[in-house]
Image: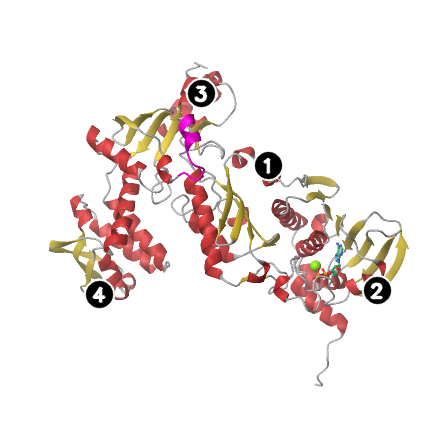
Amino acid sequence: MAIKILSDELVALIAAGEVIERPYSVVKELVENALDAGAKNITVELKKGGIKSIKVVDDGHGIAADELDLAFQRFATSKFSEGSAVGDVETLGFRGEALPSIASVGDVEMVTRAADTEHGTRYVVTYGEFQTKEPCGAPFGTSVTVNDIFHKTPARFKFLSSAAYESGRIQRLVHALATINTAVGFKLVLDDKLRFSSLGQGDQMAVLARIYTSKITDSLLAVDETIEGIAIKGTISAPNVRRSNRVGIILGLNGRLIQDRLLMVAIKQAYRGYLDERTFPIATLCVSVPTNSVDVNVHPAKSEVRFADKDRMFSAVQNAVRRTLIEKAGVPEFKRFSTQPATDTASAPTQTPNYKQTAPASQSPASDWTPGWPAPDTPIATDNAENAQNLPSNFTHREILPLMQFVGQIQKTYLVADTLGGMYLIDQHAAHERVTFDAIVGTLKTAGRLEIQPLLAPETVELPADIISFLDEHRAKLEKFGFQLEQFGENTILIRSVPALLVERGTRDITELITNILTSIAEGKSGEQWQRDIIATIACHSSIRAGHTMGADESHKLLQQLAETEQPQTCPHGRPTVIHISNRLIEREFERS
Ligand code: ADP
Ligand code: MG
């Protein structure tokens, strides 16, 4: 078979496959062009999720009539001129592929009018074939309509999902674009109904308030950090907001919406100890770096980027989020779910007649109470407003908990403490776990290892052979934590020593502990995660349990130690250690105010 060079149309179609996968990609490319054109207002209109038609209208600088043909040619771009370094382009990408690609897969009409021109131009291309170019009346700016996408490429058409799915994705895209580009007003119209709009007033919280419920927006914490020249701005949710997936995480890089696994992981890791492994926060972060330290054109759809210095980027984002959490995510506070006056609670049980018999104890009238973190602008430990005002803006963790006066213990599980600002309930096990965790981390940092307690009579543990097989490789690391373990037959290991800490606290279930540790190694977690797991496990097993009667001295000491930890409001697994019941709330409930 003779080798032939592909025709231009075919090349365009193949390239389009990379850039334009579905209506979503059309919207993304057209909106990016509009943003590059300096638009202040952008409207996206869809019919049937974009499958029938997509229209993007902007009020940007438009395209001059004599440049229109060029705009629809491959690799034609106005965003890069010879001589400028590739890395210095500050627009949303310049591959010059979007318009020709879109034109090759749909019935496309562009109406555009450049600033200072008398009239606009209408330009029509259908499935890669030029149709018309004619003058017409038009407002300044550009509108692009794409009808019947993929009609000439049935194979691709088949891959489209339902209109509901396609519009759902585009709706999230427009939300994300609006939160990253807060100075631009966005409108989204689905089948002639206005579904979303933002005002373009530069206020990210205002945009988020149009996307999320007030319960979520009330929990948002502002991030504003510059770390080693990397500026990170935006909002993150307090730990009481938990999502089962990452869709609430929106990342912008120099104004561009990106999807970057690395930075997702950085954000996720910053929430360690606040959220467990399977839950995700809501976060909208705009990262700004010098344009020459990132390559945005590596990916055809330009959603992935390449950083010059990955590690620095990772730790900057992680630290920014972490610092914000430590400084601003206070103690979860008991809040009322509904805004009804307190007297209404009395009627709640009558609405559910079987309430008393059926409701589990933990939900008694408390079903309309919910622990929540305080609103973002509530100063932490607000108890003492004067104190709070005297704090430097980057006050350290020690102010997270106020001075607590131990009052008593309830259910042999919780401590009750009095403070200027109200009452605190402390989960004694969770609190002690946090204290022990920090102590172990401290010892490892200073001494490099934990103190070992040899067992007089070594204990044996039976484990599946595949888990035991990890022992050899990790023996040295385990010793650092105080565990001397030896294989003893195919399914058995011998425990020769354990961390001294465990013995002091009289841990009984060493077997369970070793099983947990080896299992987490076998699950192939990363080194750091794995070590944290071990520390958390040791902390858990060597901490005061629920059911233990706490004396005043012991309780007092625990409260003091807790206040000195880095992250006193959660245990190492991310559960709350402390719940705050404010004076305000108590007064309201007793109808004193
Ligand atoms: P790229 O954005 O990579 O340059 P495109 O194919 O998306 O390539 O667009 C080609 C050119 O058409 C752009 O460089 C720009 O000059 C012009 N253009 C496209 N869309 C618009 C718009 N909405 N407003 C003004 N100019 C536009
Ligand atoms: Mg473009």
Q: Which residue is mark 4?
A: 490
Q: Which residue is mark 3?
A: 349
Give the residue drawn at x 67%, y 41%: 200
> Which callout, 2 or 3, points to the residue nearer the camera?
2
Q: Residues within 10 Å of mark 1 (few under 14, many from 20)?
A: some
Q: Give, as a single range, the part of the protein colored magenta.
A: 386-395
Q: Which residue is mark 2?
A: 130
> Which callout, 4 or 2, points to the residue nearer the camera?
2
Q: Please tell me whether mark 4 sits on a helix, a strand or a loop.
A: loop
Q: CA distance from mark 3 to mark 1?
A: 33 Å
Q: Please tell me whether mark 2 sits on a helix, a strand or a loop.
A: strand
Quarter containing the N terminus: bottom right
Residue 359 showing in the rendered view: no
Q: Earlier in the sequence, mark 2 or mark 1?
A: 2
Q: Earlier in the sequence, mark 4 or mark 1?
A: 1
- In the rendered image, the residue lying farthest to the left is 456
In-image side of 578 versus 260 (left or right): left
The picture places residue 575, in percent across and down from the top left corner, at: 37, 40
Q: CA distance from mark 2 to mark 1?
A: 44 Å
